[in-house]
Image (cartoon, rainbow, N blue to C red):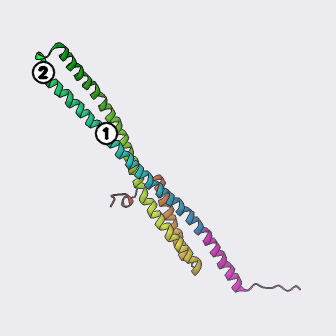
Amino acid sequence: MAEVELPNPEELHERGEDRFGRRVALVTALYAVVLALSSLGGNNAMKEMLLAQQLSSDQWAFYQAKVIRESLSRASRLRLELDFVERGSALAPDARAKMQGVMDRFTYDEKPYSTEKKDIEKAAKALEHERDVNRAKDPYFDYAEVLLQIAIVLSSVSILSKSRPTFWMSVCLAVIGALLAVNGFTLYARIPFLEPGGH
C-alpha cells in the first residue's frame, strides 16, 4: 500500500489565510479604481462649477453694459425730445429735421437692447444653473473619496490582522462611497445634508 502524506494543518491554515489576503488585496485595488474615478469626477465638477461661474459673471457684466447703453440712448433721446418741444418752433426747418433724425436714430438704437438683454440674461441663467448642478455634485464626490480612503485603510488592516469583520466593514464603506460617487455623476438622489446650504 502506498504511503499518503497528509498535509500539515498549520500549512493549510496559512494557505487559506494567504488566499484571504490575496482576495482582499484585489478588492482593495478595486476600491482604489473607484476612488480614482470619484476624485476625477470631483475635480471635473469643481472645474465646471468655476468655469460656469466665470462665464455667468461675464454674461451678467455684458448684460449690465447693454442696460447702461440702453439707458444712455434713452436719456439722450428724451433730452432731445425735451429740447425739441422747448425750441421746436424757434428752430430752422433743416435744424428741426436734423434733430428729428437724431431722435429717430436714438429710438432705433435703443430697440435692439431689450432683445439682446433677454438673450444675455437667458444665457447667464443657463450658466448659473450649470454652476449650481456642479456645485451640488461636488459634496457627493468629497464624501465618496473619504469613505473609499477609509475602506482602503480598513482592508489593508484586515490583510495584516487577517480580520474578516474589518474587511466586511471596509466593503460596507466602499459600497456607500461608490454609491455616493455614482450619485455625484448622476445626481439621481438628492441628500439634503450633503447639498450646499442643506441642513
Identify the residue at horizontal 27%, vertical 37% (top origin). 67
The tag earlier along the polypeptide, 2 or 1, is 1
Q: Main secondary structure of the magenta part?
A: helix
Quarter of the image with the C terminus in it: bottom left
Residue 56 or residue 92, whichever sits in front: 92
User: Which element is circle 2 on?
Assistant: helix
Q: Mark 2 packing: few (<14 Cα in 10 Å), some, or many (20+)? A: few
Give the residue number, with chain letter if any, for mark 2. Answer: 85
69 relative to 193, above or below: above
Give the residue number, with chain letter if any, for mark 1. Answer: 63
Marks 2, 1: nearer the viewer: 2
Q: From the viewer's perspective, is 124 left or right of 41?
A: left
Part of the protein shown in magenta:
1-26
Residue 10 or residue 61, whichever sits in front: 61
Q: Which mark is residue 80?
A: none
Q: Can residue 56 be seen in this view?
A: yes
Identify the residue at horizontal 56%, vertical 75% (top origin). 156
Question: How far apart in space, not on screen, are marks 2 and 1 (Cα)?
Answer: 33 Å
Q: Does the magenta stretch include residue 23?
A: yes
User: Which element is circle 1 on?
Assistant: helix
Residue lying furthest top: 93
Quarter of the image with the N terminus in it: bottom right
Residue type at the position of mark 1: Tyr
